Image: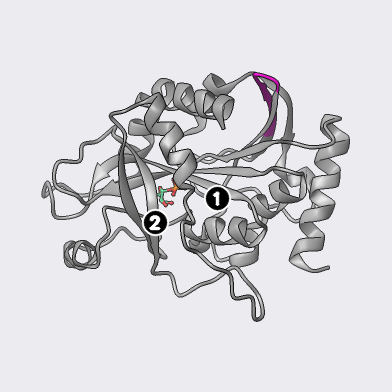
Amino acid sequence: MTPEELAGKAAEEIQSRTGVAKHDIAIVLGSGWRPAADVIGEAVVEIGVGELTGFEAPTALGHGGTIRSVEVGGKKVLIVLGRTHGYEGKGAQKVVHGVRTAAAAGVSTIVLTNAAGGLRQGMSVGQPVLISDHLNLTSLSPLVGARFVDLTDLYSPRLRKVAQEIDPSLEEGVYAGLPGPHFETPAEIRMLRTLGADLVGMSTVHEAIAARAEGVEVFGLSLVTNLAAGITGEPLNHEEVLEAGAAAAQRMGTLLRELVDRA
Ligand code: R1P
């Protein structure tokens, strides 16, 4: 089966398990974002990803292994709690399978969230940042064969505007996607700044590309969970990433709920 056929089969399974013929929006939750899911809405149905075609339980800490169907203000929302990262070594097709499945389940918008290191002067831990563009520095594309997909305005200007209407304090930034799983060195952080990056992480870019290829509108939201290497002089660790996510859960969940409502 092609990756698209696998996604189509998983979408059919979601449709039959949830009884929802078409979902409207999908939200992929980043590291430590799990508590925000409960704020977005109560799960109508929750499915273990292992029960769906083409999925494997994620191995990164802070990522659950389920897909929830939630109703928010009359909209049917799929929440993916269980992102697969490139560094898990399962290949680019597995990384974007959730996004392709959501597209096959009918969504017209995909919200990609992540925990990111903040690079820009003045950024602080716990700050949400709207992704305005990305640098894919992973040497990997999820698209197979010659598919020349345009990535201009990949991160929907329309939805960024909606988010800033909800919360005018929201800043925008360019997200650099690196392969990981090691954190970046201070020299790499200086390089990324020179390249024009404001945020750094190990996800999102492949999912955004795959979503665009499926014709789905993309919205990206980073939570600054640590300041990038070399800024504070402190070593980085994944635990502080998860803690920052938990601390911001209420604010992030409320923001996403409102965004879904107005999208
Ligand atoms: C590092 O702490 C992990 O958190 C981020 C990084 O990409 C990396 O996987 O995860 P998400 O991008 O899934 O939020």
Q: Main secondary structure of the magenta part?
A: strand
Instruction: Give how far apart the Cα atoms at labels 1 and 2 are.
Output: 27 Å
Q: Which amino acid does label 2 sit on?
A: Asp
The residue indicated by pointer 1 is 59
Q: What residue type is labelled 1?
A: Thr
Residue drawn where x is 57% and y is 53% of the image = 84
Q: Which of 76 and 19 is in front in this view?
A: 76
Q: How crowded is mark 2: few (under 14 residues within 10 Å), some or many (20 or more)?
A: many
Please say whether residue 149 is one of the residues in the magenta stretch.
Answer: no
Residue drawn where x is 29% and y is 32% of the image = 126
Q: Position of residue 156 (x, y in %)?
A: 49, 48
> Quadrant location of the N terminus?
bottom right
Q: Please identify the quarter of the rendering in which residue 167 is found.
A: top left
> Quadrant location of the C terminus?
top right
User: Are the residues at dot 1 and dot 2 in contact (C-beta closer than 8 Å)?
Assistant: no
Q: Where is residue 205 in the image (x, y as percent from the top left)?
A: 47, 59
Which of label 1 and label 2 is nearer to you?
Answer: 2
Q: Position of residue 206 (x, y in %)?
A: 53, 61
Does residue 86 sit above or below 148 in this rendering?
above
Q: Please identify the quarter of the rendering in which residue 165 is found.
A: top left
Q: For the magenta stretch, what is the residue range? A: 68-74
Instruction: Confirm whether residue 91 shows in the render.
Output: no
Instruction: Confirm whether residue 188 shows in the render.
Output: yes
Number of the label disc, if any, that sits on residue 133: 2
Q: Please identify the quarter of the rendering in which residue 115 is found.
A: top left
State the scheme by which the image is colored: one colour
Residue 34 appears left or right of 124: right
Q: Position of residue 180 (x, y in %)?
A: 39, 62
Please say whether residue 71 is one of the residues in the magenta stretch.
Answer: yes
Question: Tag 1's secondary structure?
Answer: loop
Question: Tag 2's secondary structure?
Answer: strand
